[in-house]
Amino acid sequence: MKIVAVRSYLKKMALTKPYTIAYNTFSDVSLAFFEVELANGIVGIGSGSPAEEVVGETTEQTAANLQTEYVQAFVGKDIRQFQQIIFETIQYFPHLPGTQAAIDIALHDAFGKFIGISVADFYGRKIKALATSVTIGIKNVAGTLEEAEGYKALGFKILKVKTGLDVDEDIERVVKLKEKFGNHFKIRVDANQGYTIHELKKFMDATKHQGLELIEQPMPVGTETALLSLDWSDRKILAADESLKDPQAALQLAANEKPFGIYNIKLMKCGGLVGALGIANIANNANVDLFWGCNDESIISITAALHVAYACPNTKYIDLDGSLDLAEDLVKGGFEIVNGEMQINTQPGFGFSVL
C-alpha cells in the first residue's frame, strides 16, 4: 500500500497550569504534527515535542525538518517497508529525536491501521496496564500538599515531585506529603540534575524512611561516576533521564558498575519506538528496570509510548501524564485512566481518533 501524501504543521498549545522544574518554568508548549496518508485513505498521525535543553532540538526545527524534500519523498513508498523508512530517517536526521519520533510514530500508526492490529499487539504485548504518576512542579510545602490533595480526589496513587532547587525544602516537602497522606501515595522524585553528590546523599539519608520509589536524574549529565560512591542498594532506585538519550548511552551506562538501576525512556529523547526498543533490549539484558516518561505531549505520542512500554517485559514504572497538562489536543481516545491505571485499547494502530 503506497503512501500518497504527507502533511506537517506546528501548533502552540496552552497548558492547564504553569509549572516549574529545576531549570525553567513553562506555561505553554509547541507541538509538531506529522500525517502519512495511504492510497486507501488511512491516515497515520505522529507528533514531536523535543526538549531543547536536553536534546538540542526545538519543536520549530522539528516542524521545519518535516517539510523538507526528503520527507516529501516518502510519497510513493510502501507502508509495508515502514521500518526501513524509519532506519533511513534516523541516518538522514541524526541527533534530531523530535523529528525522528514524529515520523516513527506516524508510520507505526499508519502500518498498524493498514494491517488491522494495534502497535502493542504487533510487537507482542507483555503488560496489561500500569498506574501512572502525576507530576507536582517545584513549589512550597503548602502548594505541594494542596496539589496532592487534588490528585487524590481524582483517584491517582503515585506522585512525582519535582525537586532540585533547595534540598532542605525538598526534604520537607517529601516528609510532609508522607505525614499528610500516609501510604495513599507512592512518591517518586525528579531532581532534574539539580543536586551535587553531597546534596543527594543528604536528601537520601533524610528520606530513607519515606519509602521513595525512585529518584530521577539527581545530578548533572557527565557526573555519573560520582554516583558510584553510593551503595548499590541506593543506586538501584536512581533513574537515568537526561543521561540516557539513545541506545549507545544505554550501553555505556550498563557496562561495568551501573550508576543507575532504572532507565527512563522518552520517545522524544530516543527518536520514537525503534530507538526506545533498542534501549529496552539493552536494559533487559543488563537487568535494568524501565521507567517511561514524557514531556508535555499530545495524546498521540503519549499513547505511542504506552504501546511500546506495554510490549517490554522489563517495564516497571510509567510517568505518562504529559497530555493531561494540555488545555487542548488534536485527537481523543488512545487510552483511558481507570483508578490511576493507563489502559490502552486494541484498535488498529494507536487507537486514537481525530477530533
Image (tube, rainbow, N blue to C red):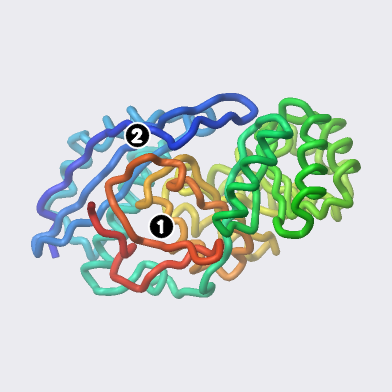
The residue at 21%/68% (across/down) is 114
The residue at 64%/28% (across/down) is 22
> Of 186 and 129, which appears nearest the observer?
186
Mark 2 lies on residue = 13
The N terminus - image quarter: bottom left
Q: Position of residue 299 (x, y in %)?
A: 37, 51
Identify the image quadrant of residue 261: bottom right
Q: Amino acid at mark 1?
A: Thr
Question: Left or right: where does residue 9 sit relative to residue 199?
Answer: left
Identify the image quadrant of residue 287: bottom right
> Of 6 and 305, which appears nearest the observer?
305
State the separation of the CA atoms marked 1 and 2: 18 Å
Question: Left or right: where does residue 150 sit relative to residue 121?
Answer: right
The residue at 53%/72% (across/down) is 127
> Of 261 and 84, which appears nearest the observer?
261
Please give the label number shown on residue 107: none
Mark 1 lies on residue = 303
Q: SS of the residue at dot 2? A: strand
